[in-house]
Amino acid sequence: MTEPRQQTATSAADPAADTTPTPPADRGPARGGKDTRWERLRPVLGRLALAAASGAVLFLAFAPRPLWWLAPVAFAGFGLALHGRRLWGSAGYGLVFGLTFNLLHLLWIDDFLGAEFGPGPWLALSGVMALYIAVAAALMSPAGRLPGAPVWLALVFLLQEYARSRWPANGFPWGRIGFSQPEGAYTPLAAIGGAPLVGFAVLTSGFGLARLIVHLRRSGATPWTGLARAAAYALVPLLAGLVLWPAVGTDAQAGSRTVAVVQGNAPNAGIGLLGERDTIRAGALAESERLATRIDRGDVPRPDLVVWPETTVDVVGGRDPDVTAAVAELGAPTLVGSLYRTDDGRTDNAVVAWRPGEGPGERYTKQELVPFSEYVPMREIAAWFTPFVGNTRDMRWGREPGVFDIAGTRVGTAICYEAAYDYPSRDAVNAGARMIVLPTNNAWFGDGEMTYQQLAMARLRAVEHGRAVVVAATSGVSAVVRPDGTVAQQTGMYTADSLVADVPLRETTTLADRFGPWTERVMLGAALCAVLAGFVLRRRAVHTTGRGG
């Protein structure tokens, strides 16, 4: 871990700029023959501890805790751990940071699969996610050479979010930095550039704060201009979000609709729910009947639209007389989450529009299936850690945006896991949706944090698209989210309940929807250019000094 002493050869992911010499504490062994193993290991152990602590702080920034401001603090610590490090050292600290965060953030995976498969699936998934962060941290080393290092470090970190959201097995976008911000100063930026821009702002603030700390530790050696630039990196993204708050609209531009959510509940049995389809169905039908009674008594207004959770019922051949009767009793069109068995023997994870007196109609089929659950890649390997390999056929992939002309308006939908992907809700809004519904079946995952993490995604999507979002969950948390991301109503977990609320309909198209995927694509291109430029500078430094960086 010994560092070169000439700044032109520094290859650190350095949030403090390349024009200031590395502090003596970062140069490795002490001089004067007093080099001991402990003196060599102490700074390494300190950085490892800082990387791990920063990963834990990042975990604390996510729901259900309203501690959004901890996210930039976490990346300030991570930036300090990477300061002055070479490529392989950065990768190692990134691995520790990523492991700590993901092991905590994805603990609900163990709640789901641990009883049958032990901690293996949770540990494996956390390890894979950490590897992405390790690679990004390594690439941050050359990018940190460039002027404006906090910006480039933020963009390079987002490279791993882009990659792991797509590969392997169609990716796993859970835990993106933007999802830590369902509320707070950075949230309004979602209306400009969606989750990618929010994540970029948080990261830039964090790495800017790290740069500021490094400058302040140099006991006045840094000119005021350097301090001002460092403070700007830390504060400008946060201030930009605050300035945009008044532009986040919540008014009803096209009237409103009274929407009801049915949460039928299910036992907290984890993987044991695999054989409890009838229990989930019975719970939804029973809660629907209770809601109908409340409506008839006048306790709540008759809704214009009812939403049931994901995969509440099995629909074989497009028929289900019990659901038809329940919808008739409610007296309102209902979006029913269904395992829809087609005539050719295939199964769709679908939302079906069910109207009183008409029965089932059009349906939306889920476009982003959950790997190793709704479809099983690499079945022989998957048999080690998933019970779903016994399915004879994978579910069918949807190909069209989720939009319904129902209840006198246009309603968009995304199903459960799709909340983590940018395009399903965006495509629905661009197809004219005035509100969004998000049915989900989260009863599998215990009473941990998964459902709150997903609700945070829904809240950020509300701001991103300028639409109210209605979350219908099997066992909670169901919620009605206003267009500014605040929660109007929500249920508890593992309880049968229903919500009835007036939901505003909006027509304005946000910049995030107009820019679409190009916000992330531009960031991706800039990050790749930064890495390339960093390697070029490193090569020039080697030729100039005759030393590696």
Image (cartoon, rainbow, N blue to C red):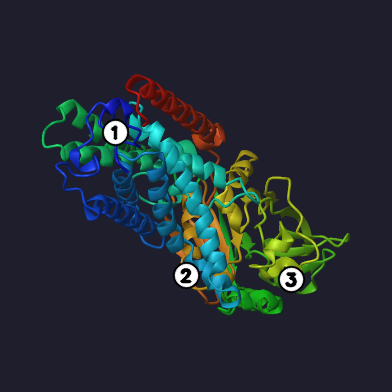
Q: Is residue 398 above or below residue 310?
A: above
Labelled disc at residue 323: 3
* Residue type at numbered disc 1: Pro
**Tag 1's secondary structure?**
loop
Q: Quadrant of the N terminus?
A: top left
Please provide percent x and percent y for residue 541: 36, 23
Gap in Å between the C-alphas at discs 1 and 2?
Answer: 47 Å
Q: What percent of the width, then of the height, locates residue 104?
A: 43, 63
Q: CA distance from mark 3 to mark 2?
A: 31 Å
- The three-letter code of the residue at mark 2 reads Gly
Q: Which mark is residue 4?
A: 1
Q: Which residue is mark 2?
A: 448
Left/right of residue 201 with respect to residue 223 in the rendered view: right
- Picture coordinates of residue 471 (x, y %)? 55, 60
- Quadrant location of the C terminus in the rendered image: top left
Amino acid at circle 3 = Val
